[in-house]
Image (cartoon, grey):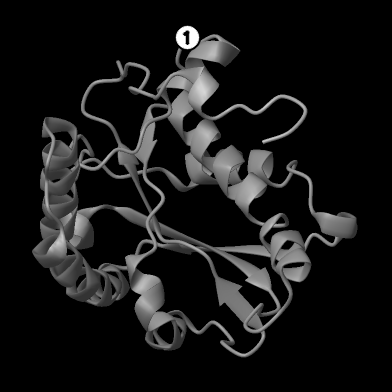
Amino acid sequence: MLLELTPDELLSTTRAVRKRLDLARPVEREVLEECLRLAQQAPTASFSQNWHFVVVTDAERRARLARLWRSVAASYLARRSAPSEQLRRIGDAVRHLAEHLHEVPVHVVPCVEGRTEDKPVAAQASRFASIIPAAWSFMLAARARGLGTVWTTFHLVHEREAAEILGIPYDEVMQVALIPVAYTIGTEFKPGRRKPLETMVHWERW
């Protein structure tokens, strides 16, 4: 069932959800497939459609991915300072997800064919342009259906090991994220705090 959100509300309230994921409620395959069909409508570079999504619901595989993720999260949290209340909350949320990632009912790993190591920036931008819009469309579609998501990349430090867990041909296919997916505890989310627009918009030149 779709939430009653305007397009602007959908865009402004699709948050990085870590602490409000319902770990006990399963996510129906048909709902995930609806989101993935919408993701397919995103543009790809040169109409390549070279995207892939690995949807992981198996508990053992989720646990193994979570161990990889947690090992990187631990070092990240250990060296991270929290000079503001906002950063402290983010750190607490990351810590919470690290403790519970294996319990999140669905892990979605967006992938793209071809690797970009040692490629020029233009080639990298083109390759990522073929998967990130689709992944974001998936996350928006999930939010519209009461699901929470968050874009994470910790496991990519161990991408080859993750590829072995998931049967991904590492030399041919690049993982770009691990997106935990679950129904949210409550469906009301507010727009996030952001810097003033003039601090990031440059008219005509930098």
> Splitting the image into 4 quarters, where does residue 184 fall?
top left
Give the image location of residue 119, x and y in percent.
71, 79
Amino acid type, mark 1: Glu
Position of residue 202 measured from the top left corner of the image (x, y, whole percent): 65, 28
Q: Residue at x 35, y 23 (%)?
A: 192
Where does the image place residue 37, in percent across and percent down from the top left? 67, 43
Mark 1 residue crowding within 10 angstroms, few (<14) / some (14–19) / many (20+)? few
For the C terminus, the image quarter is top right
Query: Can you say whether 169 is above or below 113 in the image?
Result: below
Q: Is residue 43 left or right of residue 7?
A: right
Question: On the rendered structure, is 59 left or right of 176?
Answer: left
Quadrant for residue 190, please give it: top left
Q: Is residue 14 left or right of residue 83?
A: right
**Residue 195 horizontal side relative to residue 121, left or right:** left
Q: Residue at 65% of width from left, 47% of height from top?
A: 134
- Of 197 and 87, nearer the camera is 197
Name the residue: 11% across, 32% down: 85
Residue at 41% across, 73% down: 156
149 above or below 109? above
Residue 97 vs residue 22, the one in the foreground: 97
Q: Secondary structure at mark 1?
A: loop
Residue identifier under label 1: 4
* Quadrant of the rendered image containing residue 72: bottom left
Q: How many marks?
A: 1
